[in-house]
């Protein structure tokens, strides 16, 4: 696969886009040989027998045992699925794509044919597809249109231990679908739950004491090292460890470093490159890997390095399970993750950097023992490790539920009786229902029914706050602009700010900046990008990320198609950007903040959010230095580190809230 992917890159293909025309040419004998050596292969006969006998089962096996790539193929080869499809969910987009590529290569076919994948805004399947990898979120969306999931004969819910909201909801959906298909004697549905180590009893109870199969792992010993003392700055500790190891280990040992997100990865990448210039040792290739990185760039991780070059992969917890990165010998674990978290009492949603669970620590360490014995360096003490929780908190207990509840109601499910492994706290459900009511998606909190608007909102694959923005846009005469803005906000960072040319990049960016703040600035960039003729060149000159802008452009096309299907009137507000900001407020009204420090210059100004918490402008916000600080702001996201920062922020008029979202304005204490 590595070869086929690098060919793909050399030919300048976007792996994700031109995939259908790309035929994998890897010698299939090698791949077949590798398949036969996997632990699942040893127990193939027994496994297939169990799958034949049981309609629900749990399969537990360490990462690398061959669950994800092999089991669907085996079921397909034996035609156990009858005439329907086999579908395998993954919590992450990059996993769904790379695994489909790998399996297509193993089956000696191109992806999009017998094997396909489907992720948000991208469907690479065809009527011939028999094995389909998709994100759990995509299957959940399919369940709205067809709660019985009748296209599918076998549903494999993979990486169950990650407990994403979508997977948790799918457990309930497939359970209900299985029961109903049984009662109506429609073709039966097989459900297989797969996972690395997890809390088996809970799952087994939930699935009516179904059989559990354990697969032997195929791991090599991993030596674990802990820090002797607590590390104040894990980024600094990571860079030090990288260079200590770099100068003392053979060049072909690749490193995998776990960090929390894009900014951190970029900062560490820059430091490594700087220090490498002044250090002796083998050449280094640094590869970032995080969810928001465009697929073609993610693929660099799987590209082989020349012999004698060390590859250092800087990854988020995306590399903790699901994906296989060959040749990693050393894992450096900072022990932290960035998680979305939500306080139901205040409705404040934020990103929090916190310590991971013990299970995550073991998973990360395990990545060093895939192909040979390895080592894991934990940048925290053994005692710190022992005080961590055993398993991560399921996402459903810490995330805003409005998007999921809207999907459930749209699928005709009664949220209060829906079978869940862990039920979210009552006030969290109520807070989400209240938000949906204020967005106009449902008619009441007590006995929620979808409104006409809510039905339309559920047809967009985006957060209801943003589908509301698109649906109110005709009223504000700004659908053209709203589409562009929502598309950009659905994509990753469109600015490219390399550390060593920071000043220059910021200077160039200045010409796009709107005095109203970041949203119109983003829109200005996107509009200029659409007009530019030589887009790649233009992006380079303007320090913009060409791939992310291209992605945003494609997302816009897809959102536009949905708007056209719903007969929305396309209109433009031109330079009347207030209209666009009001329109944005119609969906994001719960993301307002008010100044509490009149007269203080922008950066130091203190704000209080609608939920009542203190927040400041992120240093990257266009309004950071605004003087005097705007009395009211609309932000896209809160980031919680040592302080709480508002990210992607625009100035609004305080009285707009009353006009645009009167229900919310009445209940919002900070506003009054
Ligand atoms: P599991 O789901 O049990 O963690 P997988 O089915 O994902 O295991 O992978 C099984 C094995 O297949 C891996 O250990 C690795 O040897 C090989 N493999 C899978 N994906 C790739 C890939 N993209 N490149 C190289 N080898 C891979
Ligand atoms: Mg797997």
Image (cartoon, rainbow, N blue to C red):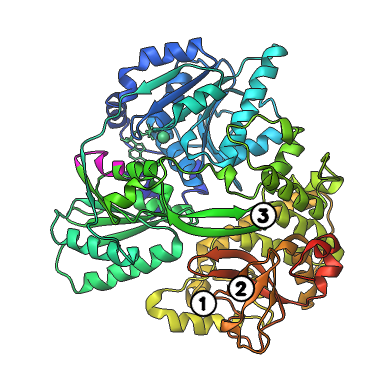
Residue at 65%, 77% in the rendered image? 517
Q: Secondary structure at mark 2?
A: helix
> x%, y% of residue 636?
64, 65
Asked where in the image residue 321 lies, by quadrant, the reply is top left
Q: Which residue is mark 2?
A: 525
Q: Which residue is mark 1?
A: 542
| Res. 107 in view | no
Dot 2: few (<14), some (14–19), or many (≥20) neighbours within 10 Å?
Answer: many
* Quadrant showing the C terminus: bottom right
Q: Is residue 644 magenta?
A: no
131, above or below 366, in the image: above
Judged by depth in the image, the label closer to the viewer, 2 or 3, is 3
225, above or below 222, in the image: below
Give the extent of the magenta segment: 366-373
* Nearest to N terminus: mark 1 or mark 3: 3
332 relative position to 581: left or right:
left
* Nearest to N terminus: mark 2 or mark 1: 2
Q: Which residue is mark 3?
A: 345
């Amino acid at each position: 696969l590595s070869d086929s992917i690098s060919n793909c890159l050399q030919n300048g293909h976007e792996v994700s886009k031109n995939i259908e025309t790309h035929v994998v040419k890897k010698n299939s004998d090698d791949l077949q040989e590798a398949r036969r050596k996997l632990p699942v292969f040893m127990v193939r006969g027994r496994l297939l027998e169990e799958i034949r006998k049981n309609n629900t089962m749990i399969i537990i096996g360490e990462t690398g045992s061959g669950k994800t790539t092999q089991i669907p193929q085996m079921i397909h080869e034996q035609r156990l699925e009858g005439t329907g499809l086999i579908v395998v969910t993954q919590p992450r987009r990059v996993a769904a794509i790379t695994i489909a590529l790998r399996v297509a290569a193993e089956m000696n076919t191109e992806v999009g044919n017998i094997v396909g994948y489907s992720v948000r805004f991208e469907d690479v399947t065809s009527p011939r597809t028999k094995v389909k990898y998709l994100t759990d979120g995509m299957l959940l969306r399919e369940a709205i249109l067809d709660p019985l999931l009748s296209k599918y004969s076998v549903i494999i819910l993979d990486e169950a231990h990650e407990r994403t909201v979508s997977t948790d909801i799918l457990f309930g959906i497939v359970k209900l679908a299985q029961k109903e298909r049984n009662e109506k004697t429609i073709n039966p549905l097989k459900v297989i739950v797969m996972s690395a180590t997890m809390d088996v009893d809970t799952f087994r109870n939930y699935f009516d004491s179904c059989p559990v199969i354990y697969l032997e792992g195929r791991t090599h010993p991993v030596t674990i090292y802990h820090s002797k003392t607590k590390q104040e700055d894990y980024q600094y500790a990571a860079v030090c460890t990288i260079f200590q190891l770099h100068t003392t280990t053979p060049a072909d040992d690749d490193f995998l470093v776990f960090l929390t997100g894009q900014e951190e990865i970029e900062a560490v990448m820059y430091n490594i490159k700087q220090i490498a210039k002044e250090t002796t040792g083998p050449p280094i290739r640094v590869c970032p890997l995080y969810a928001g990185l465009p697929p073609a760039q993610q693929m660099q991780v799987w590209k082989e390095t020349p012999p004698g070059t060390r590859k250092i992969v800087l990854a988020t917890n995306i590399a903790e399970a699901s994906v296989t990165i060959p040749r990693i010998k050393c894992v450096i674990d900072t022990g932290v993750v960035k998680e979305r978290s939500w306080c139901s009492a205040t409705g404040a949603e934020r990103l929090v950097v916190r310590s991971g669970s013990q299970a995550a620590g073991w998973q990360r360490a395990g990545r060093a023992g895939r192909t040979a014995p390895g080592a894991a360096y934990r940048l925290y003490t053994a005692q710190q490790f022992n005080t961590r929780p055993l398993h991560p908190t399921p996402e459903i207990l810490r995330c805003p539920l409005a998007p999921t509840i809207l999907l459930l109601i749209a699928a005709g499910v009664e949220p209060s009786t829906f079978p869940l492994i862990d039920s979210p706290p009552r006030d969290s459900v109520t807070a989400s229902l209240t938000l949906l009511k204020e967005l106009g998606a449902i008619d009441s909190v007590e006995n929620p029914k979808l409104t006409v608007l809510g039905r339309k909102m559920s047809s967009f694959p985006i957060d209801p706050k943003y589908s509301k923005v698109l649906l109110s846009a005709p009223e504000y005469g700004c659908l053209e602009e709203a589409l562009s803005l929502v598309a950009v906000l659905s994509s990753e960072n469109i600015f490219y700010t390399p550390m060593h040319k920071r000043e220059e990049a910021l200077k160039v960016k200045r010409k796009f900046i709107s005095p109203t703040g970041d949203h119109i600035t983003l829109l200005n960039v996107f509009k200029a990008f659409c007009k530019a003729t030589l887009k790649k060149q233009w992006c380079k000159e303007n320090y913009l990320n060409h791939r992310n802008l291209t992605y945003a452009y494609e997302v816009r096309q897809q959102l536009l198609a949905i708007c056209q299907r719903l007969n929305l009137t396309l209109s433009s507000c031109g330079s009347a950007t207030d209209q666009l900001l009001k329109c944005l407020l119609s969906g994001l009204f719960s993301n307002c903040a008010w100044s509490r420090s009149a007269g203080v210059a922008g950066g130091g100004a203190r704000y209080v959010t609608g939920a009542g918490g203190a927040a400041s402008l992120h240093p990257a916000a266009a309004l950071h230095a605004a003087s005097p600080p705007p009395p009211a702001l609309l932000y896209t996201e809160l980031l919680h580190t040592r302080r709480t920062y508002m990210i992607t922020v625009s100035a609004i008029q305080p009285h707009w809230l009353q006009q645009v979202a009167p229900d919310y304005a009445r209940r919002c204490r900070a506003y009054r």
